[in-house]
Structures are given as C-alpha cells and as structure tokens.
Image: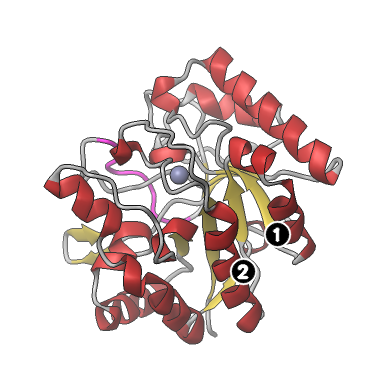
C-alpha cells in the first residue's frame, strides 16, 4: 500500500536561519512566500503541518488564520527562532508562553500538538526542552536529525522512525514517554546515511535522485519532508555570506518550489499529527 508521508513547513522569515548570523533586517516577506506554498498545497489538495515562529505569527495574524482555515496543522517553531542551545529552560518556557498567547489571541484555544526546534537544536545537551513541551501539552516533537554532518546539529545513532522519546536520552525509546518523536529519515545505502527529505538537501540534490531515494525510504516507512517558504521564493534577499553559508542558504532557490511540486505529484502527504495518529 502506498505510504502517506508527513509534510512540515517551517514558517519563518528569510533571515531566521542561523547561518545568516542573527541579523534582523526590517524587510518581511513571509506572507508572500508562504502564500506560494499554500497555493501549491491547495492545487494538490494536500494538508501539512506549519511550524510557525511566534514573532512571525505576531506580525502576520492574518497568515496564521489563513493557514488554520485551510485545514493545516499549526505547530510551534519557537518564538524568536533562537536554537535551544542559546536558551535556558526558563527562557524556553517563556518562549512557549509567548507563542501560545499569540496563537490564542488569533485563533482562540486550539490544540498545539507539535514542536520543531529551530535549527534542529534538540539533542542530549538540550533534552530539558522535552519536559517543558510536556508541561505545555505537546504530544510530539519533530526536531531530531539523526545524522551528524555539520557542527550545528545532528544526533548520531538516534532512531529514524517515529518513537516514544526518552526524556533521559533523546536517542533512546521509552514506551512510557508521553511524547512522540518524528525524526528526519535519512536515505540508507549500506552504512551511509544521506539526508534527503527537505531543506538544503531538497534544493541541492537532483530530482531523479530525490524521487529514487524517497521511494526507497517508502518501501519501509513514511518520511517527514520539511520545507521553508523562503526556500522557494525567488525574491528571498541574498546576503553577503561566506562561500559555504551562501551555498547552503541560497543554492537551488529558483527550482525548489518546482521540486516540491514534483514530490507532491509522486508521493502522498498529510499533517504530522495525522501520520502519528494523534488526530
Ligand atoms: Zn527554522
């Protein structure tokens, strides 16, 4: 039977990526960039999960309302987009409090079930975040990147399928844990693990390879595809960055939306909470 995969749209501004060095230029484009993604999902009658940055929701309440009214899941992508390693437990609690109060001000009390840490910053150094998520009623996290390829993020040895995440060790399964984890699923070839399911990897890898790799993953399990609206928006400003950061941030922006469309053509997708059976 054809697998249904999870679709996550990290709804943030073009300047939120850590690679841009924390700059906050006074130029906003998230409504236009997200509208393109919403139109595409409408065309394919597909619902996804929008992990929204709190300060984006605060500035653009009409966008949050539109996403919600279209039937997509509203998830949390932090308030300020600071990665967990830049926060303390108390500051993280404060971030969630602000996020929830902004969303409640726009939509009233709706269930927020899922969290995606900015820059995949959940690992054993920041596992304290899991307890705070449970306090706030979260049912799942989708922040574990089970491949360690860059100095910023990655949890080597973490499971690659959804699991009940241990609060003691994020790489371990604990059937009693109230929190599910939906990790990113890499393509496994022999002993190689290659991330392919979104972001820079979606932009950089050739489409035939993506299709082949994702089909290969689907033989065994669903995957979680992630995409940022700025990644598919032609007008995303290009800042002066080091060669590597420029490559990771901007490579393939012109063709990313088309690639996402091809994936919508070839695979079935749904909201993360639906795939996890939480809804
Ligand atoms: Zn992000």
| Magenta-drawn stretch, dominant element (helix, strand or loop) | loop
Residue lying farthest left?
Answer: 243
Is 154 on the left or on the right of 83, as rendered?
left
Quarter of the image with the N terminus is: bottom right
Q: Residue at x 63, y 63 (%)?
A: 271
Occupied quadrant, residue 253: bottom left
Q: Which residues are magenta?
A: 152-161
- The numbered disc on residue 38 is 2
Q: Is residue 131 above or below residue 110?
A: above
Q: Residue at x 61, y 64 (%)?
A: 48
- The numbered disc on residue 86 is none
| Residue under label 1 | 67
| Residues at marks 2 and 1 touching, judged by CB atoms closer than 8 Å | yes
Q: Quick one: label 2 or label 1, which is nearer the N terminus?
A: 2
Q: Where does residue 162 sit, x and y in percent of width and height?
A: 50, 53
Which of 242 and 165 lies nearest the eye of the viewer?
Answer: 242
CA separation in Å, label 2 and label 1: 8 Å
* 160 in the magenta segment: yes
């Amino acid at each position: 039977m054809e697998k249904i995969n999870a679709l996550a749209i990290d709804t943030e501004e073009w300047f939120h990526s850590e690679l841009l060095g924390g700059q906050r230029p006074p130029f906003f484009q998230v409504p236009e960039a997200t509208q393109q993604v919403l139109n595409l999902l409408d065309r394919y009658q597909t619902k996804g999960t929008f992990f929204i940055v709190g300060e984006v929701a605060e500035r653009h309440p009409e966008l949050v309302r539109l996403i919600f009214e279209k039937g997509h899941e509203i998830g949390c992508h932090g308030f300020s987009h600071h990665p967990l390693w830049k926060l303390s437990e108390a500051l993280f609690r404060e971030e969630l409090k602000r996020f929830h109060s902004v969303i409640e001000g726009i939509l009233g009390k709706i269930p927020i079930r899922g969290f995606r840490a900015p820059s995949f910053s959940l690992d054993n150094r920041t596992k304290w975040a899991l307890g705070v998520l449970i306090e706030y009623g979260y049912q799942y996290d989708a922040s574990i990147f089970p491949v360690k390829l860059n100095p910023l993020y990655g949890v080597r040895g973490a499971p690659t399928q959804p699991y009940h995440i241990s609060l003691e060790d994020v790489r371990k399964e604990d059937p009693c844990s109230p929190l599910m984890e939906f990790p990113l699923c890499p393509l496994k070839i022999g002993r190689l693990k290659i991330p392919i399911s979104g972001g820079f990897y979606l932009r950089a890898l050739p489409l035939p390879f993506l299709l082949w790799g994702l089909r290969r993953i689907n033989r065994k399990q669903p995957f979680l595809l992630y995409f940022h609206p700025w990644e598919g928006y032609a007008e995303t400003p290009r800042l002066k960055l080091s060669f590597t950061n420029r490559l990771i941030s901007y490579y393939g922006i012109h063709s990313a939306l088309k690639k996402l469309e091809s994936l919508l053509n070839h695979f079935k997708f749904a909201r993360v909470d639906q795939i996890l059976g939480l809804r």
